[in-house]
Amino acid sequence: MNKTPNILVTGAAGFIGSHTMVELQQAGYQVIGIDNFENSSSRVADQITAITGIATHIEKIDIRDKKSLNEFVNTHKDIAAVIHFAAYKAVGESVQFPMKYYENNIGGTVNLLEAMAANQINNIVFSSSCTVYGEANPPVDETAPVQQATSPYGNTKQICEELLKDQSQATGLNVISLRYFNPVGAHDSALIGELPIGVPNNLVPFITQTAIGKRKQLTVFGTDYPTADGTCIRDYIHVVDLAKAHLKALEYQLAGKNKQSFDVFNLGTGKGSSVLEVVAAFEKVSQQKLNMVFGPRRTGDVVQVYAACNKANTALGWKTERTLENCMQTAWAWEQALAAKENK
Ligand code: NAD
Ligand code: UD1
């Protein structure tokens, strides 16, 4: 019988974690998911099962709870690699409650690395962010310098990269840090997607919540930027493309193809889109006008950032397949599915 490696996924019920669980299962991996369900729903496991037809269980474990985490990892002796998503991610909240972010994002990662070391688990794929580059000249590749973080959240990503690097030097741990640009969209089934807590800060959920009537209007933050239409430019990557990149990174690592024990890859589309282009794509696929007003710039926003992804394209053999319109179409289908459930 062919034995496929066991992969531990932290934050498995979250937005990117759940889509990655699907891709891993569909590729034949045995997946062990953990989550504390603080920012997600325990029902996500059933949705994953509905998509893949493979019975899915996500164990309720808080990675800050060292004892439970150790016990859990210890009882699953044959884990080949960990994909580590579990973290808090709200930039604004991190400014208000920095210790909460340092405790969870850094403390949780330290606990995880200790549990891995104690159980000889030698591979980890980590969720980092393009936020580490700050205001850089796009297209941004992995040689761009890491800038002073502008929020505690951003700082947790930088510090985690540093501590992963130290651990890889000390123990030979293989680390791939994936620096995501702007993950958006949802699974084609509309069974899993992003679940923003409270009022969304991010553009795409704000657009779909406005269209469904949860928000009055979208405010475009700044129209006087030095870009073609005056609005900021970002690199919006479909969450399914992003999930597939995790699979490629894992395969690269498990095949021992990594050239260095700590490596980073940018994950984006390589194409920048302005806020108004995102709105136009949404209006096209949803065939409705979005209620929108123009407002002042948001403090801390960079003018434009998009990825150079040649490294991931070449080394991992990965490239994005989805368009911006597909991102908006799947995000909109997900928002409508959520509304239909709420109205039942
Ligand atoms: P998410 O909030 O949807 O998922 C994170 C999951 O981790 C949630 O299900 C949450 O309940 C869980 N979690 C949080 N703390 C935990 C803990 N102590 N123990 C166990 N589970 C815990 O977020 P996401 O968008 O899926 O992001 C996943 C990762 O990617 C995060 O590390 C995030 O910082 C990073 N990232 C996200 C984006 C983005 O825009 N979504 C961009 C760059 C990087
Ligand atoms: C945010 C985070 C960043 C994170 C990234 C991807 C901040 C300051 N930064 O950045 O750390 O890595 O998401 O998850 O939160 N916009 C509007 N109106 C809105 C919302 C957004 O015009 O209501 C604009 C923003 O000004 C920006 C663009 O849309 O130009 C995208 O915003 P957002 O989705 O928040 O992503 P980032 O700014 O890239």
Image (cartoon, rainbow, N blue to C red):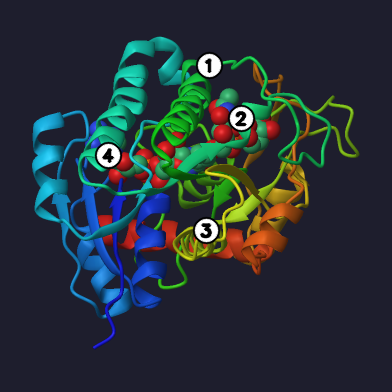
The residue at 72%/62% (across/down) is 314
Q: Are marks 1 and 4 in contact (CB under 8 Å)?
A: no
- Which of the labelled discs sits on residue 260, or is there none? none
Ligand 2 within 8 Å of disc 1? The answer is yes
Q: Which residue is mark 3?
A: 249
Mark toward the start of the polypeptide (1 vs 2):
2
Provide residue 266's location: percent of width, then percent of height: 65, 46
Q: Are marks 3 and 4 in contact (CB under 8 Å)?
A: no
> Which is more foreground, mark 1 or mark 4?
4
Provide residue 284's location: percent of width, then percent of height: 69, 63
Question: Separation of disc 2 and disc 4 at Cα?
Answer: 28 Å
Circle 1 — which element? Answer: loop
Disc 3 marks a residue whose amino acid type is Ala
> Which is more foreground, mark 2 or mark 4?
4
Q: Which residue is mark 2?
A: 131
Provide residue 34's location: percent of width, then percent of height: 22, 49
Mark toward the start of the polypeptide (2 vs 4):
4
Circle 2 — which element? Answer: helix
Q: Can you see residue 219?
A: no
* Residue 294 figure quarter: top right
Disc 2 marks a residue whose amino acid type is Thr
Ligand 2 within 8 Å of disc 2? The answer is yes
Question: Separation of disc 3 and disc 4 at Cα?
Answer: 20 Å
Q: Are marks 1 and 2 in contact (CB under 8 Å)?
A: yes
Q: Which residue is mark 1?
A: 151
Q: Quadrant of the N terminus?
A: bottom left
Q: Which residue is mark 4?
A: 117
Relative placement, left or right, of 40 versus 149 is left
Q: Nearer the viewer, residue 55 or 234?
A: 55
Mark 2 surroundings: few (<14), some (14-19) or many (≥20) residues within 10 A: many
